[in-house]
Image (tube, grey):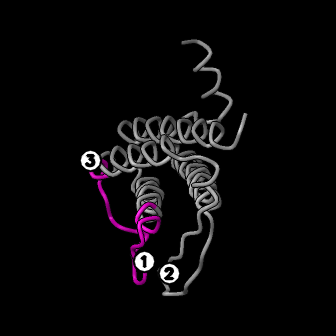
């Protein structure tokens, strides 16, 4: 499997995991888990904006979003990542993106590296959500990558 195919698969998993996380948050109300989920989603959105040259200086990565707002952000953002990767090739993945962090510090990374960061960042924070939900005695979503793969094999 080449990098493009692998990233497409990981983005499909990411969408699946977001959907399962939203479903769990609909039934198990956890303000702390929802706040982490909002952070995860808004970060994915902001990285898309960085790809398009937007300056992130002063950006708030910890907004207060309700579940309906999270659902909207997730839908739009995941669709935009799918569009991005649908037309990407190896050359596009090597393209360098120049951006400023929320602290205003300039950096540059390849699209490949930024996509990898977004996916890993999302995974880390979904793990935080699972932990918070368990600490609160709630049923967390089952979002392991292997479960995603197994669910695909059933279809």
Could you say which disc has been placed on residue 40 in the image? none
Instruction: State how far apart marks 3 and 2 are (Cα).
Output: 29 Å
Residue situated in front as seen by the camera: 111 or 13 = 111
Instruction: State how far apart marks 1 and 3 are (Cα).
Output: 24 Å
Considering only order in the chain, which callout, 2 or 3, is on the residue closer to the N terminus? 3
Mark 2 neighbour class, 10 Å CA radius: few under 14, some 14 to 19, many 20 or more:
some
Q: Is residue 55 above or below residue 63?
A: below
Please tell me whether mark 2 sits on a helix, a strand or a loop.
strand
Q: Main secondary structure of the magenta part?
A: loop
- Tell me if residue 62 is in the magenta stretch: yes
Question: At 62% from the left edge and 64% from the top edge, which residue is drawn?
Answer: 110
Residue situated in front as seen by the camera: 107 or 95 = 95
Question: At 35% from the left edge and 39% from the top edge, which residue is drawn?
Answer: 26
Question: At 47% from the left edge and 40% from the top edge, which residue is drawn?
Answer: 21
Return the residue at label 1: 56
Return the residue at label 2: 100
Q: Pointer 1 and pointer 3: residues touching (CB < 8 Å)?
A: no
Left-right relation of 81 to 71: right
Span colored in magenta = 48-69
Furthest residue toward top = 154
Considering only order in the chain, which callout, 3 or 1, is on the residue closer to the N terminus? 1
Return the residue at label 3: 68
Q: Pointer 1 and pointer 2: residues touching (CB < 8 Å)?
A: yes
Mark 3 neighbour class, 10 Å CA radius: few under 14, some 14 to 19, many 20 or more:
few
Residue situated in front as seen by the camera: 153 or 1 = 1
The N terminus - image quarter: top right
- Tell me if residue 50 is in the magenta stretch: yes
Residue 37 percent across, percent down from the top left: 45, 54
Furthest residue toward front = 91
Please tell me whether mark 3 sits on a helix, a strand or a loop.
helix
């Amino acid at each position: 499997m080449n990098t493009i195919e692998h990233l497409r698969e990981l983005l499909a998993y990411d969408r699946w995991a977001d959907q399962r996380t939203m479903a769990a948050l609909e039934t198990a109300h956890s303000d702390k888990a929802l706040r982490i989920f909002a952070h995860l989603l808004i970060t994915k959105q902001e990285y898309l904006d960085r790809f398009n040259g937007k300056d992130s200086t002063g950006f708030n990565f910890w907004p207060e979003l309700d579940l309906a707002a999270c659902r909207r952000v997730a839908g739009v953002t995941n669709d935009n990542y799918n569009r991005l990767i649908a037309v990407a090739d190896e050359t596009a993945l090597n393209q360098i993106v120049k951006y400023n962090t929320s602290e205003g510090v300039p950096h540059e990374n390849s699209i490949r590296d930024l996509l990898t960061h977004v996916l890993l960042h999302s995974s880390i924070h979904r793990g935080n959500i699972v932990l918070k939900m368990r600490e609160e005695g709630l049923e967390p979503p089952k979002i392991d990558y292997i479960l995603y793969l197994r669910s695909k094999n059933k279809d």
